[in-house]
Amino acid sequence: MAEFGIVLPNTGFEGEQRFKDIVTLARKAEALGFDHLWTFDRLFHRTVPVLEPFTVLSHVAAVTTKAKLGTSVAILTYRNPFVLAKVVATLDVLSNGRMMLGLSLGRNENEFAAGGVDPSKRVRAFMDAVKLMKSLWAGEPVSYNGPFWRASEAVELPRPVQKPHPPILFGGAAEGVLRRAGRHADGWIAGGMLTPEEVKEKYRVVVESASESGRKDKPLLGKIIYISLNENEDEAARYVADCFKRYYGTEFDVRKFAAIGNAERCAQFLKRCIEAGVELLILSPIPATPEHVEDVWSKVIERLR
């Protein structure tokens, strides 16, 4: 059965005024029945403010009790895996086993430089970091004397509540990412600019890679879905497009990949995602207000449950 999550407004698509709604929105979403709460990630941005995702999840963990908490997706390449493993384990313990870890390579060379990673070696750094974190969460003494970090017989306690570790999902759409997700992650998070049909095609690569590696379980499939519920579809599309232009600096035909318009139209888009195999529907509401989230639940999601 599909699960529904909400992206909290830690990325200022609509400006800093939405930050004050994060706690209210998280509480509202959990009370309504949303299964998880997510954050986006970005280190540098010239025009859009972005709150650090794990700090936001720690804040939200303290005011919720049931909803899972996830990053969709955190850029691993500029983070030290020894520090991140401790952060994730801490969040999992304090939230009583509610963490989900979405990870990405990223693509901003300035962020790579800040993290001390040569962009040409980012894939190796990413995979070394994933392997290190898994070993640390297992409670094993970990030594690493590679090109990126140094550690000798390092042990991190406590271990996460979830065993062997919180679910790891890779983000990205390149074939290499899809194949790595099938082999090394618990699942894949499809980006918000992919159509349901594109997601279905790419997910086949994830499943194929998982099968080739000898996995018996089927990888999870999540998808970020931008949603704007509004009887005036043109008005909604303009508002979402303006938010995207502010963040990405270019124009997008948002109707192709977002759930925009009245309740029936939005529900049909989500239904297409479910039919494509999406299990974790990660809804990014625009506008990101408690009132809009309540409308999305009562007028759209209730049609699908």
Image (spheres, rainbow, N blue to C red):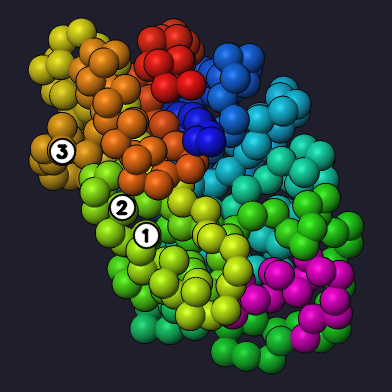
From what the image shows, is residue 236 above or below residue 110?
above
Mark 1 and mark 3: span between their CA atoms? 19 Å
- Is residue 226 visible in the rendered image? The answer is no
Front position among marks 1 and 3: 1
Spatial CA distance of label 2 from label 3 is: 13 Å
Cβ–Cβ under 8 Å for marks 2 and 1: yes
Q: Amino acid at mark 1?
A: Tyr
User: Does the residue at mark 2 contact the one at mark 3 (Cβ under 8 Å)?
Assistant: no
List x then y, in percent, for residue 27. Answer: 63, 17
Residue marked by disc 3: 256
Front of the two marks 2 and 3: 2
Magenta span has 211? no
Residue 118 on image: x %, y %: 42, 81
Residue depicted at x 88% and y 62%: 157
**Separation of residues labelled 2 and 1 (CA atoms):** 6 Å
Which of marks 3 and 1 precedes in the sequence?
A: 1
Q: Which residue is mark 2?
A: 199
Secondary structure of the residue carrying tag 3 is helix
- The residue labelled by disc 1 is 203
Note whether 120 is above or below 302 in the view shown: below
- Which residue is drawn at the image coordinates 60% and 53% (left, top)? 101
Is residue 174 toward the left or the right of residue 207 in the image?
left
Amino acid at pointer 2: Val
**Badge 2 element:** helix
Provide residue 91's location: percent of width, then percent of height: 74, 45
Q: Which residues are magenta?
A: 126-143
The residue sitting at 66% across, 30% down in the picture is 67
Q: How would you rate the neighbour count of disc 2 (Cα within 10 Å): few for under 14, some for 14-19, many for 20 or more?
A: many
**Seen in the image, is 16 located left or right of residue 22?**
left
The circle drawn on residue 245 is none
Q: Residue at x 15, y 38 (%)?
A: 256
Secondary structure predominantly adopted by residues drawn in magenta: helix
